[in-house]
Image: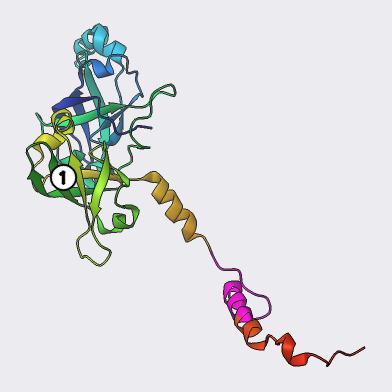
Amino acid sequence: MFTGIIERLGRVEAIELGTDSAVITIDAGDLVADLELGGSLAVNGVCLTSIRSAEASASGTAGTAAASEGTASAPASGRFVAEVMGETLRLTGIGALQVGDEVNLERCTPASGRFDGHIVQGHVDGCGELLHREDHPEWSTLRIGIPHDLAPYTAVKGSIALNGVSLTLTAVSASHEPRAWVEVGLIPATLTHTTFGSLKAGDPVNVEVDVLAKYTARLLSFRTPTISPLTGAPASADAANATAVNAATTINPASVQGNDHV
């Protein structure tokens, strides 16, 4: 799990394309100094798994042995290497990365860590794009186009992860608009310490909506009305009909005074 608080910028050093996958190498500096084989790192909001341990990277022993066998050597210290399958390449902005590109990096959150952002899983829901940016003297407004099916999970003042950055939404598209979008306001610190400072119109943006909103929507989708065994109609409708009938047949006590029967 992540919190969307970017720890540093990394740089793509190599991309080895396969038939339907890729191996990506990122210079992550001391952020991955203790990252073991199988450890997680969020790259532009995508949770990727290390396929080479930090120990092998730092020692050079594995690299020497590999070189003598004619195989690829272990990466230098500070390099993060991960395999990316075809689905991830197609559904996220990882597939558009090129050597030299900067990326947002975040290590997974330790159990004893401070929770500064919001719950971010590193499981991107879709890829959007920067539609427009307005740079003010002391802050910037960015409008991001998002897949239409993600719009119901967004709300003003709600949380969203864009390229792995935990952000608060300042505006969202109306339900009737043909193009779904969200807006965020970014302070200089965010622009400086993330890739948003250099993001241009048309650039891809990885979108992960609030997981709590997704679970809520999923739970509500399984709510079915209780069917009345008497009428075959939803019990809620029976209750409404009963209320109407009772209201129509309620007897005024004043009209039956003197008609008591023993």
Task: Judge left or right: residue 214 versus residue 25.
Answer: right
Could you classify mark 1 by the number of other residues whose Cα lies within 10 Å: few (under 14), some (14-19), or many (20 or more)? many
Residue located 25% across and 62% down the image: 174
Whether residue 72 is visible, yes or no, is: no
State the image coordinates of residue 73 (x, y, percent, origin top left).
20, 15
Q: How is the image coloured?
A: rainbow
Which corner quadrant holds the N terminus? top left
Task: Judge left or right: residue 134 versus residue 157.
Answer: left
State the image coordinates of residue 215 (x, y, percent, origin top left).
44, 49
Which corner quadrant holds the C terminus? bottom right
- The correct choice, above or below, for 168 with respect to 195 in the image is below
Residue located 8% across and 46% down the image: 134
State the image coordinates of residue 31 (x, y, percent, origin top left).
26, 18
Rendered image quadrant of residue 138: top left
Q: Amino acid at mark 1?
A: Pro
Whether residue 262 is visible, yes or no, is: yes
Label 1, on which residue? 204
Task: Judge left or right: residue 108 versus residue 138.
Answer: right
Q: Secondary structure at mark 1?
A: strand
For this rendering, which residue is in front, 227 or 63?
227
In the rendered structure, does residue 199 fall within the stretch colored magenta? no
State the image coordinates of residue 118 (x, y, percent, origin top left).
35, 37
Residue located 73% across and 88% down the image: 254
For this rendering, which residue is in front, 73 or 132?
132
In the rendered structure, does residue 241 fall within the stretch colored magenta? yes
- Give the number of callouts: 1
Rendered image quadrant of residue 79: top left
Residue at the extreme right of the image, as rendered: 262
- The correct choice, above or below, for 111 with respect to 138 in the image is above
For this rendering, which residue is in front, 248 or 40?
248
Residue stretch rendered in magenta on the structure: 224-243
